[in-house]
Image (spheres, rainbow, N blue to C red):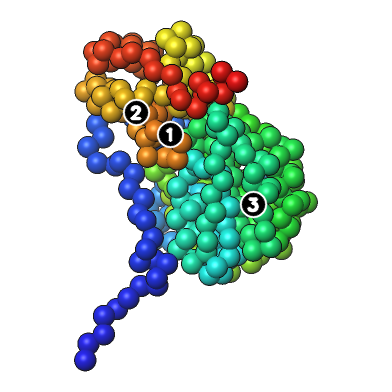
Amino acid sequence: MSTKLRARRAVEILKEYHPPLGDRDGLRLDFNENVDGCSPLVLQTLHSIPAETLNKYPEREPGERSVAGHLGISSAQVLLTNGVDEAIHLLAESYLEPGDETLIAVPTFSMYEIYALATGAVVRTVPSGAAFEFPAEALLAAITPQTRLICIASPNNPTGTIATRAQLLAILRAAPQAAVLIDEAYIHFGGESLLDQVGILDNLFVSRTFSKAYGLAGFRLGALLGSLSQLKLLRRVASPYNVNGIALTCLGAALDDHNYIAGYVAQVLEGRSLLEDFYRTHVIPYWPSQANFVLAYFGSYRQALVEEMRRRGILVRDRNSDPGCQGCVRITLGNRLQTARLLRELPAALRSIAFTPQPHPTLAAKEAQ
């Protein structure tokens, strides 16, 4: 008698995350990457890597010391990870038992929910406010003794909104039994960091990524920061070789090129202001952003705009399926030349599809109050 192999029930019912990776020729303003590329110093280092680097198992600790020195914390408070995705996965595996609760303010990064559900935990979502403001009071009210993980992106994706330092500290103090992840993937572009609280609040974890401002998304390199006692436990779950040797070899160059990062961030902030000005001038509802992108509402023209921009060689992200984001499109900002191209093609695309601005139902109701 044959028996069919079955995965755990939590895995069988888990929804899949499918980023739009195929057929993506053009200017990639859809993934919040550094569209300009990485630092020239990183490229120089990459081209000079000797062959013997590739035949050795990678050593993570020197990279963790470099990140710790850059951030001004102890190397024992840094765990390098395979992107922030692995950091989230490690937290879920380390702190969640089946039936435990995870709290997430939505809309936000999909992987928080996916990794939590994969453990058999219960995910409770808290909707953001009418203007996508962080729902601090509602999230505080949702905390129970069963709450074991809270994930907060600030600045948040896909909205670009932030949680204030006071709001985040209140949540950390209200849930001492829960691991609280503050995902600072977009912190170079805005928001208030809690880096100075790492090691002070034992339940605080801060994640950083090298996929955004640093332009190293292809390296899959992130960092999880936390207290010495908690990271010691997480290292038991993490693979000792989770970060590849090429990424580790180039990490120092990425950290050292302060001028490159400052210059790129300045161009993004300039472009973000210009795009928001465009939306205001054309009465297109949008949400003021503290990240390297802007979310705007195009209503029933959403799909036509995404397709027309693709035809013009620019990829933008359809966020229609995110909670509360019906009719919304997110556009990433790049360097000055890329922003200039965007601001030439976007109005032309809107004219091509005979776009007429539509009021966002929730924002319009709030403004009418």
Instruction: Point out which mark residue 316 bears.
Output: 2
For this orientation, the residue located farthest to the right is: 200
For marks 2 and 3, the one nearer the N-term is 3
Above or below, 17 against 282 in this view is: below
Q: Amino acid at mark 3?
A: Ala
SS under mark 3: helix
Q: Is residue 72 in sight in this rendering?
A: no
Labels in figure, total = 3
For marks 1 and 2, the one nearer the N-term is 2
Q: Position of residue 337 (x, y in %)?
A: 39, 15
Find the distance from the CA under tag 1 to the CA under tag 2.
Answer: 15 Å
Find the distance from the CA under tag 2 to the CA under tag 3.
Answer: 34 Å
Using the image as rendered, state which of residue 7 and residue 31 is in the foreground: 7
Q: Position of residue 181 (x, y in %)?
A: 61, 50
What residue is rendered at 37% in x and 56% in y? Answer: 15
- Which residue lies under the disc numbered 3? 142
Image quadrant occupied by the C terminus: top right
Q: Is residue 301 in sight in this rendering?
A: yes
Q: Amino acid at mark 2?
A: Val
Q: Position of residue 286 (x, y in %)?
A: 48, 22
